[in-house]
Amino acid sequence: MTKLIWNALRLSPVVLAATFLAANSAFAAEVNDQVTPVASLSQESNNIGQVTSVSQFSDVQPTDWAFQALQSLVERYGCIAGYPNKTFRGNRAMTRYEFAAGLNACLDRVNELIATATADLVKKDDLATLQRLQEEYSAELATLRGRVDQLDARTAELEANQFSTTTKLSGEVIFNLGQAFGDTRALPSGSNAARTNLDSNTVFSDRVRLSLNTSFTGKDLLQTRLEARNTISNSGITGTNMTRLGFDGSTDNDVFVDKLNYAFNLTDKVRVKVDASNAQIYGNTYTFSPDFSSSGKGAISRYGRFSPIYRQGAGGSGLTVSINPKGTFGATLAYLVPRGGNNPVAGQGIFNGDNTLFGELAFKPSNALNVGFSYARSYTGGATPVFQGTGSALANSPFGAGVRTDSNHYGIQANVKPSDKLTLGGWAGYSTADAKTGAVRDADFFYWAASLGVQDFGKEGNVLGLIFGQPPKVTGGRGITRESGTSYHLEALYKMQMSDNILITPGLLVIFNPENNNSNSTEYVGTLRTTFSF
């Protein structure tokens, strides 16, 4: 190697720099005792940009011993590149593959000079040295060309056989094993019906979702989601919606188009989403419940996922506008028409049928603190429950079946991360409802919950979760039955990340005083949910 450097001192600047690079590569090979493959080169080695003057390098000074050699290579031959941050990094070791790539660039540049009748710029000694270098690194150059050809062939094959250049497929499959337990079925407050035993069986169920996500500009998204499921609601077994799972619902495993929507950026800070089917506020805005909001990877219960205010207007079509969603201060505005509300036969349309107007202000100064203030005003012709099937039967239908109802919902949600391993969250909500037919009647409701998430509990990627709260309860009003008791929701779950694509979640749900009736016995729901994602 010393002889190689000594001979290089007698050559022209271009040869001096080239042979120095070869010596440096040989020394690196001696130290590493192996040849680094192209696939393992650092990302920053791939992000090299051409420069036109050696003075553009911030780490090369005129006093450096190799300054003139680099100056000749850059300004005379134009075949040495630097990094995007305008550095050359002359002290960095390189592999023979990297040197071969640089040498190939110099050879191409020399050939270009010869082809354009500027061969006088290329000295005979330089050409002889470059020829020797080309012969020395012929194996590496051949390997590089071969690998490039292979990549070109593989790329062409992928492009020819890919499903779409604009659409990606993602999916989620849930297998759940569960059973509800308890002495007797729950009865609503004030009910005089005879009590019956809670008879249940262990049930195995599933839910399958396939999403076709299409982007035409890179900043928009057309989502078409297919779904099939057969998870029956526990309410038919236990007598209360409070025992419902977060992913329940049944289509007898027939496949339906579950969601169809299109989102795009109106400006850099305004995003618009148009839902044609199954619009959901909780799918269009942040719910301040990062550990538990997902139906497949979050809480096991319906109430434990997030505040009921986010369920208003769910199921139909809608328009959502998000303002500065990633900034410190953000806002969300939405208008939703629940399933069946936009009925042209009945003369309802977009504005005359069931509808929900939603607004939220979000304050997110950092990942450690997020707070949201929400408001929703809903109208229902009587078929849609006030809380979309969350909470007691009386809270969902305070004036009886088929009564047109206006309701106002106010909520505050927050989550705090005192450390990277700990998340504290929760919500509180107050709602009012007014009957629009019959006698003057109104109702007041209250609900709240607190949650704890412990990340990497027992193993990296695992999460231990605890949720405790009070589902929606009728706390006051005129001309209605008030609920004297108070239900409490207790949920414990442990999310075990078996791999990047498999999550197993055992969980236990306990409902004290179901249906806000102190006479009802405690009810339990045990689950073992396995979620596959791809």
Image (cartoon, rainbow, N blue to C red):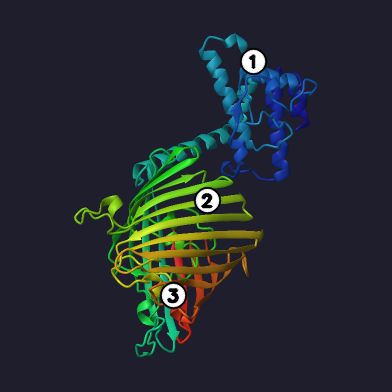
**Residue that numbered label 2 is attached to:** 361
Count of labels shown?
3
Towards the viewer: 71 or 355: 355
- At mark 3, the secondary structure is helix
Q: CA distance from mark 3 to mark 2?
A: 29 Å
- Asked whether, in this view, residue 16 is left or right of residue 41, the answer is right
Kindly report the distance in space between the C-alpha atoms of the residues bearing marks 1 and 2: 60 Å
Could you say which disc has been placed on residue 242 in the image? 3
Kind of residue at badge 1: Arg
**Quarter holding the C terminus?**
bottom left
Q: Which mark is in front, 3 or 2? A: 2
- Precedes in sequence: disc 1 or disc 3: 1
Residue of label 1: 76
Name the residue at 48% across, 82% down. 513
The furthest residue to the right: 63
- For image coordinates 39% across by 57% down, the residue present is 280
Q: Where is residue 267 shown, x and y percent of the image? A: 46, 37
Q: Nearer the viewer, residue 498 or 528?
A: 528
